[in-house]
Amino acid sequence: MTEKLTVEFRRSGVTGTWDGSHDNILELAESLDLVLPYSCRSGICTTCQCRKIEGDIEYGDDGVYQPDAPDEILICCSVPKTALVLDI
Ligand code: FES
């Protein structure tokens, strides 16, 4: 069973709960009716890149591009490891 984790989209003023029923953070955001930029949805284009204010994530696929800055993440191909606060 997946641990439930809070994911706060701070600038949007929306908070959701990660319960493992979505494939990535972008899908969770969309389930909350947030309209966020994306293109490839596979970790290549960086359109979905955003700043992580608090918390940890992990990428589902080892081959995915990962931004150099540790607080920049690609939400189309990552999942929360802890409660998150994102600057979107
Ligand atoms: S949408 Fe292209 S990297 Fe996330």
Image: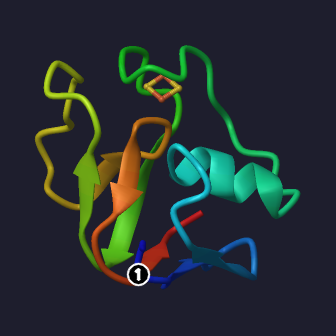
Residue found at x 44% / y 20%: 42
Three-letter code for the amino acid on which mark 1 is drawn: Glu
Residue that lies at the very extreme toward the front in this rendered image: 1
Does residue 61 appear to the left or right of 85 in the view shown? left
| Quadrant that contains the C terminus | bottom right
The quadrant in which residue 66 appears is top left
Residue 44 image point, x, y percent: 36, 15
Position of 43 compared to 31: left or right? left
Label 1 sits on residue: 3
Task: Pick whichever, 7 or 47, lies toward us.
Answer: 7
Q: Residue placed at 37% from the left, 46% from the top?
A: 78
Question: Ligand 1 near label 1 (Cβ, under 8 Å)?
Answer: no
In depth, the one of 62 and 69 nearer the eye is 62
For residue 76, above or below residue 62: below
Per the image, label 1 sits on a secondary structure element best described as: loop
Colour mapping: rainbow
* Residue drawn at point x = 62 percent, y = 28 percent: 38
Q: Position of residue 20 (x, y in %)?
A: 51, 62
Q: Position of residue 65 (x, y in %)?
A: 22, 24
- Left or right of residue 77, residue 66 in this image: left
Residue 5 in the image: above or below residue 86: below
